[in-house]
Image (cartoon, rainbow, N blue to C red):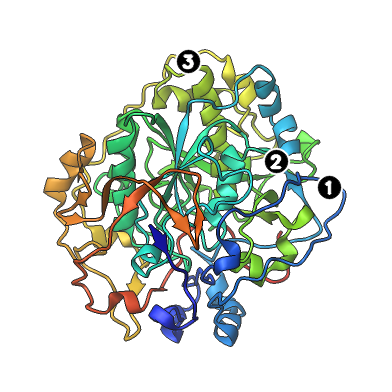
Amino acid sequence: MTRGHQTSGTTEGWRWTPRSIAKGAGASLLVAAVVGSAALGVLGGKGSESKASTTTTAAPTAAKTGLLGGVLDSLLSTTNALTGFGTGFAEWNTSRNVLRSELNVVMGSAAVHATGVKGSGVDVALIDTGVAPVNHMNTDDALLNGPDLSLDYQAGMPASVDGFGHGTHLAGIIAGRDAGVAPEARIVNMKVGASDGAVDVSQVIASIDWVVAHRNDPGMNVRVINLAYGTDSTQSYKSSPLTHAVESAWRNGIVVVVSAGNTGGALVNPATDPFVITVGADDTNDPYNMFDDTVAPYSAVGTAARRVDLLAPGTSITSLRVPGGYADTKYPESRAVFGWYAKASGTSQAAAWTTGAVALLLDARPELTPDQVKAILKSTARPLAGVSADSQGAGVIDIFKAIAAPVPANATQTFTKSAGKGSIEDARGTAHLVADDGTELSGEIDVQGKAWAPATWAPLSTAGKAWNGGTWNGNVWAGSDYDSSTTVDGVEWSARTWRAETWTARTWRADMWAARTWRSETWKARTWRADGWV
């Protein structure tokens, strides 16, 4: 199945409206150019990470990227739109590289690799903006594409391909074949975020449910979910459908790693759920000096009701980039050596690092339960000197120490479970899809306009049966098997791809696919700023 690429900044409504930032401070945008043909297919070079130079080469030019000129520039320069919760992806800085290869040494994962433990046999579900078929992530052993539940596919774009760069960057940290934490783990690519970042909470919940339903399919062994997503919802975890979904995964044997958020304050939902592993960002400063580590100032720390569990490296992390994607095109200074890598900061990167460590632990000790994995990682973490436990949780992850550590006696978690029967609108917080005329997706419906039925959904989610073939919440969301031949602009994917389907139930707005602007961006990495990473 061949899918075309977007050829205009206005076709299919890929445009931004002033309404998107009308909420002022804290209401910001995750913006992305639509990926053009030069950025699709098999990308990347054969180079490896190096600190020899930060000089970059020009990015491949994406034809007809849909970059929206002055509109994007004006939005990105709006100070109030780049503060507070959900403020874009990240900041860029060309003066600093923190390489995955050196972090593997100082964090202990290289020593674990030397024992033969590299994540083999462990599938990691990455629920994010997709993964581009770049070098080091473009083979069957590295990547399996689940159903594309994003708005991109509904607009005619290629299934599963990352048009922004966030998901690909995290995939490289987790399981990049060059320098990933778990270089033999496999990414199950669950794309929900569009190239402009647009996503509804119902898409995320559906994606989690799909992973649970298919975790043990023939040839699959999903043991970890990485979720660098959250909303500013204040809904109790005991009723939130989003926290119920992550708990369903947890109770079905899947470790769920969630980013804390980049507010510097309260955690986002579902990081508030006490069962999952909530990760804050460690700024390693000099990676070879463990005594100068600090909690990154952007990293959410939580409240008395729920703190972070662990810290992991999150600042100026070098990983795989998407040539021709929005971030790559708008911020070429982020490109690292050979032009095939980029730097990014945020709790997303910290969560990805932790996810890779979990994959190593489960490779070495596949019998461990999610509760046991969490308890081991917390009991072996390295506390930062002079830093309150309220800010760092148990401390910085130490995977080498964790590999052989005994299971703590109090590993079983006894928190009250989420019933999941609360409002899906409340789970959205302030993040809503907004049409060109200002009509927003809100109320007790999913992204297809289907009425939300929590009393029916919650027990099915708990049992791992919320999907029936390609149907979820009463509508067709995806196919029911793998596509035999998937191409991207004529180049065949080497990774298997689950069959996607066109949604026919679009009742919340008859023209809903004509506009997909964000009122509040929710991917957990730092603010895009032209003056660099911090």
Q: Mark on residue 100?
A: 2
Q: Is residue 129 visible?
A: no
On screen, residue 355 above or below 23: above
Q: CA distance from mark 3 to mark 2?
A: 28 Å
Residue linked to disc 1? 51
User: Residue 114 appears at what percent x and percent y?
Assistant: 69, 20
Q: Nearer the viewer, mark 3 or mark 2?
A: 2
Residue drawn at (52%, 42%) of the image? 279
Whether residue 414 sits left or right of residue 342 in the image: it is left
Neighbourhood count class around disc 1 (C-alpha, 10 Å): few under 14, some 14–19, many 20 upward: few
Q: The residue under label 2 is which amino acid type?
A: Arg
Q: CA distance from mark 2 to mark 1?
A: 11 Å
- Choose between 270 and 465: the one closer to the eye: 465
User: Residue 311 appears at what percent x and percent y?
Assistant: 59, 39
User: Residue 85 appears at what percent x and percent y?
Assistant: 49, 63
On screen, residue 106 above or below 486: above
On screen, residue 405 above or below 300: above
Q: The residue under label 1 is which amino acid type?
A: Lys
- The total of numbered circles placed on residues is 3
Whether residue 51 sits left or right of residue 313 in the image: it is right
Residue drawn at (56%, 15%) of the image? 405
| Circles 1 and 3: CB atoms closer than 8 Å | no
Q: Nearer the viewer, mark 1 or mark 3?
A: 1
Sequence-wise, which precedes: disc 2 or disc 1? 1
Image quarter (top left, top right, bottom left or bottom right) of the C terminus: bottom right
Residue linked to disc 3? 407
Q: Mark on residue 287?
A: none
- Label 3's element? loop
User: Residue 358 appears at what percent x and percent y?
Assistant: 52, 30
Q: Is residue 504 visible?
A: yes
